[in-house]
Image (tube, rainbow, N blue to C red):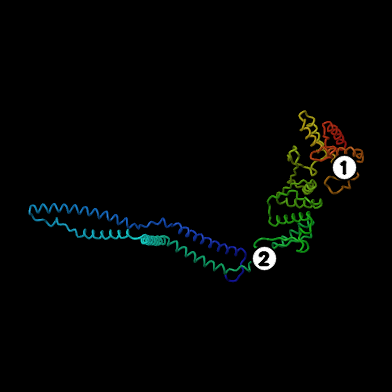
Amino acid sequence: MFCGRPYDFGSVKLVGSYFDHVSNSTKHAQASIDKELQRNDLTKVVISLAEDELALFENEKFIERLKASIQLINRNKEIFIDHLTKKSHVPDAVVLDVTGLTQEITQEISLINERIGNLQKSESEIGEIIASRKASRMVVERNEKLHVSMPLLEEWFRLRDLITEYTKTSKKFSTNSLTQKQGEAFKEIIQSSYIETFDRFAQELRVTNVNIKLNSQKGQTVRKKYVVSEEYKVSDIMSEGEQKAIALVEFATDLTMRRNLNPVLFDDPVTSLDYKRSELIAKLIYQLSLDRQVLVFTHNIMFYYYLYNACAKTRNNENKFFKVDEFDNSNKGIVSETFSGKLETLREITKKLKDQEQRINSKACVGDVLEESLKKAYSDIRTWCELIVEEGFFNSVIQRYEPNIKFTRVTGIKGDFIEELATVNALFEKACRWMTGHSQPAETQHIRATKEAFNEDMVYIKKLSDRYR
């Protein structure tokens, strides 16, 4: 360990884990010893110091001996009187020796006198005696506790010496050279790869004048984005749309560098962006979807069309597109899969209007239900007006949400449709007033769509749809 040879990062982590393991294990053992010492509560150590109770027990036995001796003396007295009356010799067997008893009586009298003397002492003297007895008891209890815990104390001191030795060893282990090598590896491997990937995505979204700098601080990577010089922050110079594009570049770079294949969700990612950059972001999102599942929610129909075209160019059938049709006036909708990049064609919208015509003319469609059905129908009539011009008049030379014109098909424009433009335009304006969620001037707010007006408009819609189908 102390030969001076630099260690790699894995070796340093391994040695560090050994030190941590030893330190944690010894600390755990030390904590268990402390807990065991605390568990030996002084109140649980039972030491018998009841000298008074023992003396009382001995006194009771002494009194019993006195009673027995008195009975024996009385018996011998009767024997002596009997022999004196008969003037006969008294045998030695009945002679009593009460010398020991006399000594015990003398000793007991001394103890009683001592107790009487103690009872006659003052309160201060009694307090000193009690304090002395308590101190003696505490000494005995401590000695008992030390005796019981001696093996644990020996283990505790052994572990403490071990921790001290390991601590001294760990201080000799220097990681300065390792830190320097780690910084060089970070710049060579991580930073260069990250910046290269970031620049590639920035080129794709056409935000090429942005630079990024990575710094490793305490195991964390700090990123700083700037324009030309570090003095000029991205947030101080670039527009909201450009900043959003840079954020998407950084996000795509993170996914790529981390090899993160978890599902990704985008919620209207092209807000505040122009249509050109929206198309670039659609292509970027499609690239990300090749390695992971991507969910996109959007209200932007043009962005939806860009996503659809990105998938259609590679004929990727794994992608699914869905639309939400309004169900009622409570912001409820029905989600269904769609197979068209334009959401609806002239044929589809015409069929939809015919279905609504049957529902509106049914006997059950009255009152509020009829009013809501007419609003929804005129929302679709507005779409029909756009599609009849796109497909019927321009013959798809220009299409909704497409930036370019198909010049090779210009000769296919149907000039006779010009005669219908005024009528279609009037129908479009009517639909805008009567459709769901659309405002209209105050002077026409009292005007509502009627079943009769709808049926009349449907006659014209079906006739023109059949003509330019």
Q: Which mark is residue 395?
A: 1
The reply to whether the C-beta atoms of the residues labelled 1 and 2 are less than 8 Å apart is: no
Q: Quadrant of residue 370?
A: top right
The Cα atoms of the two marked residues, 1 and 2, are separated by 63 Å
Query: Furthest residue to the left?
Result: 87
- Please, what is the three-letter code of the amino acid marked with disc 2? Gly
The secondary structure type at the circle numbered 1 is loop
Which is more toward the observer, 443 or 261? 443
Camera-side residue: 53 or 425?
53
Density class for disc 1 (Cα within 10 Å; few <14, some 14-19, many ≥20) is many
In the rendered image, the quadrant that contains the N terminus is bottom right
Q: Which mark is residue 183?
A: 2
The earlier-in-sequence mark between 1 and 2 is: 2
Position of 70 compared to 206: left or right?
left
User: Residue 333: in sight, yes or no?
Assistant: no
Residue at x 74%, y 58% (from the top left corner): 198
Taking the image as shown, residue 22 lies to the left or right of residue 425, namely: left
As drawn, is 29 to the left or to the right of 89?
right
- Position above or below: 360 against 415: above
Q: Residue at position x 86%, y 43% from top?
A: 396
